[in-house]
Amino acid sequence: MTTIALISGANKGIGFATAQLLAGRGMTVLLGARDADRGQRAAQALREAGGQARFVLLDVTDEKTVRQAAEWIDAEYGRLDVLVNNAGIARGDGTGRPSETTAGPLREVFETNVFGVVVVTNAMLPLLRRAPGARIVNVSSEVGSITSMTDPGSPLYPMASVPYPASKAALNMITAMYAKELKGTPVKVNAANPGYCATDLNGHRGFRTPEQGARVVAQLATLPAGGPDGVLWGHLWTASGPDGDGVLPW
Ligand code: NAP
């Protein structure tokens, strides 16, 4: 039985790299994208590389596309084995200080990074419950860890903006609450920290590649039955540099 995986925001960056990795493991990858041209092109590129890939229109801020995507997956496959909530944006005001934050960017970021995840997850949950052992991966970040962001010894300490870090902190809580509700079922829910990867999101300033970030996501998407559940897991960044993968503090 082929494993069916849906990835939101899969047309580029970490989402596309995750699609490549999961397709490379023989999964049928449904590339969610909000723009049909970009999504079709990404799916085509994966097929040309030998993967099983199909585009599905999915704007996580547009409930109609979310509902239609779920109906299409139900009609085509009847279940979903892997959901990767990857679509995300970063916005800010002025210098990014909390005192300069306005509601506009805050709302925009939360619509995609927070509300979109809940809407997509709830639309897909009936399909995920029909899979023998579904995995939900929420692509989060260490900047959503209140412990790391308030630790003067952390390389993240100088960062003081509100919208993006607050959205990932909310996503971490969402991850923990879904994991709690789904405890005792075969569905595992985890948050991934891909590390700082060079993508459009950060003007390609990241020191890791999207592929390195995607490896973290793919690992959580393919966890065995005894694997972790309800954790923030991934790249550990210490002041002295890259430090492998592991569980991060909330
Ligand atoms: P990216 O290259 O900018 O890719 C973001 C993806 O999300 C794009 O495919 C984008 O589509 C899509 N997207 C944005 N809004 C959407 C919406 N409303 N509906 C559907 N898709 C939407 O950024 P990335 O770095 O790969 O980010 C992927 C995820 O990793 C995000 O959740 C981000 O927060 C997280 N992350 C990134 C880093 C990093 O260092 N890069 C670190 C930690 C976590 P369009 O092409 O149409 O804009």
Image (spheres, rainbow, N blue to C red):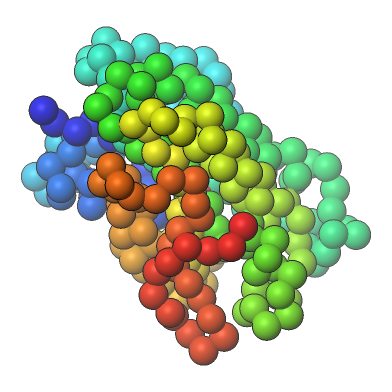
User: Which quadrant would residue 151 be assigned to in this image?
Assistant: bottom right
Count every numbered label the image shows and give the total: 0
- Seen from the viewer's position, the closer of residues 9 and 238 is 238
- Seen from the viewer's position, the closer of residues 119 and 221 is 221
Note whether residue 39 is visible: no
User: Which quadrant would residue 100 be assigned to in this image?
Assistant: bottom right
Question: Which residue extends farthest right?
Answer: 99
Note whether residue 242 is visible: yes
**Residue drawn at x 36%, y 21% as measured from the top left:** 129
**Residue drawn at x 35%, y 25% as measured from the top left:** 128
**Residue drawn at x 68%, y 65% as measured from the top left:** 147
Measuring from the top left, give residue 159's x and y in whole percent: 71, 70
User: Which quadrant would residue 221 be assigned to in this image?
Assistant: top left
Measuring from the top left, give residue 47's x and y in whole percent: 14, 40
- Seen from the viewer's position, the closer of residues 9 and 179 is 179
**Residue drawn at x 48%, y 72% as measured from the top left:** 236
- 124 lies left or right of 111: left
Residue 162 lies, with reference to residue 47, above or below; the image says below
Question: Which residue extends farthest bottom?
Answer: 240
Measuring from the top left, give residue 33's x and y in whole percent: 40, 35
Residue 91 lies, with reference to residue 204, above or below; the image says above
- Seen from the viewer's position, the closer of residues 99 and 78 is 78
- 26 lies left or right of 131: left
Residue 248 lies, with reference to residue 238, above or below; the image says above
Measuring from the top left, give residue 63's x and y in whole percent: 55, 19
Image quarter where the C terminus lies is: bottom right
Image quarter where the N terminus lies is: top left
Residue 37 lies, with reference to residue 76, above or below; the image says below
- 194 lies left or right of 147: left
